[in-house]
Amino acid sequence: MNECFDDGELAVVERRIDEWLASFRAGGGDMVVDVQRGEPDERRWYVRMHGTEKEFTTVWLTLGQRTLRYETYVMPAPEENHAAFYEHLLRRNDKLVGAHFSIGVEDAVFLRGEFAVASLSQGEMDRILGSLYSYVEQCFRPALRIGFASRFPA
C-alpha cells in the first residue's frame, strides 16, 4: 500500500507542485495556455495546453493522501460505430504508459491515471503532462473519424 501523507506533508507537496507547474508554464512557450489552482479548499490544479489535432488539452491534477490523480477530457461519447470506437480505444490502452482511456460523465471519453505521492518529482510531473498531451494528440483524430464518421466527407 502507498504511504499516507498527513496535512503538513501534503502542504509541502502542494507547494512543490505549484513550483513545478509555474516552471512548466514558464518553459512551455506558446503551448501552455494557462495553469490554475482549483477552489481554495481543494488540492487541485489544471493545465491547459494548445494542441494540433485537438485545439486544447486540459489536464486536471488532484492530490490525495496517497496518490496524485490526473485526467483529461478527450471527447464526447461516439454517435456511431460504437463497437469499433471502443475497440480502437481499448487497443490503444495496451500501448499507453501511466494512463488509460475510461468512460466518464455522460459516457464521455477521458484519459486517466494516478501516481504515488511518495514518488512524485518534477520529472514525473513533466512525464505525466507530456504523456497525456501526446496521447490525446495521437488518438484524437482517428477516434473522431470512427465515432463521428458521418460528419466527415468520404
Image (tube, rainbow, N blue to C red):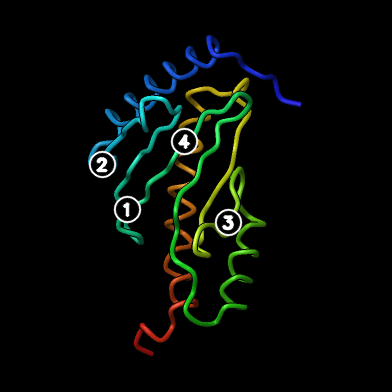
> Which numbered disc flags the more N-terminal residue, 2 or 3?
2
> Distance from label 2 to label 3 (Cα)?
24 Å
> Distance from label 1 to label 3 (Cα)?
18 Å
Cβ atoms at labels 1 and 3 below 8 Å apart: no
Instruction: Name the residue beneath numbered marker 1.
Output: 56
Q: Point out the residue furthest to the front here.
A: 41
Question: How many numbered circles are shown?
Answer: 4
The image shows residue 66 at horizontal and vertical percentages of 63, 25
> Distance from label 4 to label 3 (Cα)?
16 Å
> Which numbered disc flags the more N-terminal residue, 1 or 3?
1
Q: Point out the residue furthest to the left here.
A: 30
Residue type at mark 3 is Phe
Residue type at mark 2 is Val
Instruction: Name the residue beneath numbered marker 4.
Output: 61
> Distance from label 2 to label 4 (Cα)?
16 Å
Q: Is residue 109 left or right of residue 93?
A: left
Q: Is residue 26 left or right of residue 86?
A: left
Q: Residue placed at 37% from the left, 19% from the top?
A: 19
Rendered image: mark on residue 33: 2
Q: From what the image shows, is residue 154 above or below residue 119?
A: below
